[in-house]
Image (spheres, rainbow, N blue to C red):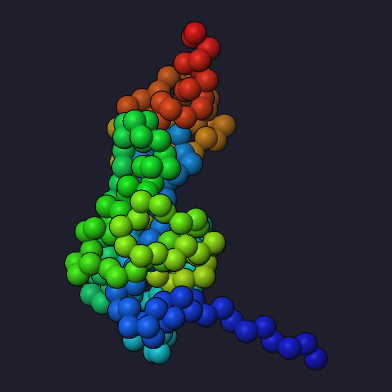
Amino acid sequence: MMARLNPIDRFEFERGLWTQGVARVAGVDEAGRGPLAGPVVAAAAILPSKWAQSGLPRELEGLNDSKQLTATQRERFFAFLNSCGEVTFAIAQIDAGQIDAINILRATHRAMNDALAQLQPAPEHALVDGRPVKTMRVPQTAIVQGDARSYSIAAASVLAKVTRDRLMLEFDRQWPKYGFAEHKGYGTAQHLAAIAAHGPCPIHRRSFAPFKIKELELF
């Protein structure tokens, strides 16, 4: 008979900090680093430590990396995180113009810092999805695939993803020729064909390919 695998403890990193007396632990994640258009959005979320003992509220059962969830699941979790009153969170965005001016990595890190700076009271530690952020203004723990290993990061992932998707739906209404509602600004065949037919619009990232390539071709 095969031994059952132990389930992932998605409060492992938070719990380690809470036991050291670090009370306010924020999960941080971003959405929209790779698209050709639209802002990069970051969110920071602090979950109550009592959930490590009681378990997640029923409304958050199944919380995970936003990319592993359906749009319906993300919207449901987003609504609860906004309304439950026990989660402290903040969301920040950096638009395409700023991304072009400072590059996408710096823009992503700026959005993360901006989200953390909005939290009141201030966080004492950040759990970051992926690699360490050199410019982060609070102590941090970087966790590879953190959005699937930490509930705090997963919550931030959902908040950032839903916020950005809603922004892209608004942009789709402003510039319907590009199909932002379907691809959310990513470089799909549909999107590239629309760019070839109509050129870039104000929310396209001119420092990204294919725009940068076109610019180089001119010279």
Residue 75 screen position, x and y as percent: 38, 61
Residue 185 lies in quadrant: top left
At x 47%, y 62%, the residue is: 142
At x 34%, y 86%, the residue is: 50
The N terminus lies in quadrant: bottom right
Residue found at the far right of this picture: 1
Residue 156 visible at all: no
Label total for image: 0
Residue 98 lies in quadrant: top left
Residue 70 screen position, x and y as percent: 49, 60
139 up-or-down from 62: above or below: above
Q: 202 or 147: nearer the eye? A: 147
Q: 26 or 190: nearer the eye? A: 26
186 up-or-down from 71: above or below: above
Residue found at the far top of this picture: 219
Residue 7 visible at all: yes
Residue 108 screen position, x and y as percent: 38, 46
At x 36%, y 34%, the residue is: 102
Q: 49 or 82: nearer the eye? A: 49
Specify whether 196 is left or right of 139.
right
At x 47%, y 71%, the residue is: 150
